[in-house]
């Protein structure tokens, strides 16, 4: 692994650690600084630091991270724009969905890996349904895209030129992002526990980091 990539991973880990520590201490200003900073470092790495990389896969992953950064800002406590934040992450995951579909057209034989994501999505909806209120339709749309993203990551290894390492990194990252959003939904719509927030953040940044590292060809 190149030195620039190692420095990138270290910077993400340090910034994420400060953000999680700030969240644990209810340090609003610290969290407002390090949460978007961590995603910005991820965006910087995806755009320039991770070498070698494949285009247009790199461009789509970078777009997803830029939209995730917008979502991070919109969901900060000082703004707490849940609908707008969901929209930003919906677009981010659509960008990842497009990235994972490059050179990987949908064929009937790929439908089986969709099943576990549909089951996980149905369980998540079941758990939070009563607390969604007017957000039921947006959350259903969001989960549909999230399931599709995970499914396309699970089939990405069939695309020509995709290394096993890149495939595994992208799939693991997509699964962690799914888990992060499941924890977020449970925390926002059922039980607002601080420990769940810390778990959510750890899953989120680990997932984003792995997707970013999957750029390496």
Image (cartoon, rainbow, N blue to C red):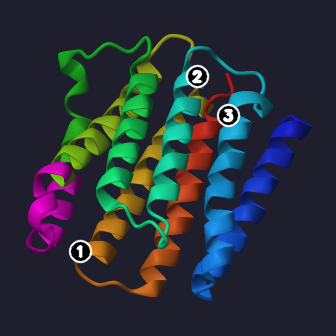
Q: Disc 2 and disc 3: Cα gap in Å? A: 8 Å
Q: Residues within 10 Å of mark 3 (few under 14, many from 20)?
A: many
Badge 2 element: helix
Identify the residue at image location x=19%, y=44%: 141
Badge 1 element: helix
Q: Residues within 10 Å of mark 1 (few under 14, many from 20)?
A: some
Badge 3 element: helix
Which comes sooner in the sequence, label 1 or label 2?
2
Identify the residue at image location x=58%, y=22%: 59
Q: Which disc number belongs to residue 189?
A: 1
Image: 137 above or below 75: above
Q: Is residue 169 visible?
A: no
Residue on which disc 3 sits: 46
Percent coordinates x, y for residue 162 in the rendering: 55, 19
Is 186 displayed left or right of 172 in the figure? Answer: left
Quarter occupied by the N terminus: top right
Is 110 displayed left or right of 40 in the figure? Answer: left
Residue on which disc 2 sits: 59
Percent coordinates x, y for residue 188 in the rendering: 30, 74
* Residue found at the very far right of the displayed protein: 3
Image: 134 above or below 143: below
Snapshot quadrant of residue 182: bottom left
Q: Which residues are magenta?
A: 119-138
Q: Residues within 10 Å of mark 2 (few under 14, many from 20)?
A: some
Is 32 displayed left or right of 99 in the figure? Answer: right
Quarter occupied by the C terminus: top right
Identify the residue at image location x=34%, y=51%: 84
Q: Disc 3 and disc 1: Cα gap in Å? A: 32 Å
Identify the residue at image location x=40%, y=67%: 80
Compare residues 4 and 48 and report the one nearer the observer.
48
């Amino acid at each position: 692994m190149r030195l620039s990539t190692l420095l990138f991973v270290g910077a993400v880990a340090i910034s994420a650690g400060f953000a999680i520590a700030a969240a644990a201490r209810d340090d609003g200003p610290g969290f407002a600084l390090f949460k978007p900073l961590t995603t910005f470092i991820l965006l910087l790495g995806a755009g320039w630091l991770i070498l070698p990389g494949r285009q247009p896969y790199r461009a789509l992953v970078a777009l997803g991270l830029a939209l995730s950064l917008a979502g991070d800002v919109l969901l900060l406590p000082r703004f707490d724009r849940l609908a707008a934040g969901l929209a930003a992450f919906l677009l981010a995951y659509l960008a990842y969905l497009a990235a994972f579909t490059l050179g990987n057209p949908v064929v009937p034989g790929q439908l089986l890996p969709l099943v576990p994501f549909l089951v996980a999505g149905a369980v998540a909806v079941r758990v939070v349904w009563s607390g969604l209120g007017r957000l039921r339709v947006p959350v259903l749309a969001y989960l549909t895209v999230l399931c599709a993203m995970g499914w396309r990551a699970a089939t990405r290894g069939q695309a020509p030129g995709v290394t096993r390492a890149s495939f595994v990194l992208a799939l693991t990252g997509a699964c962690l992002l799914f888990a992060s959003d499941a924890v977020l939904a449970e925390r926002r719509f059922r039980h607002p526990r601080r420990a769940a927030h810390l778990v959510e953040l750890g899953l989120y940044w680990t997932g984003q980091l792995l997707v970013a590292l999957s750029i390496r060809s």
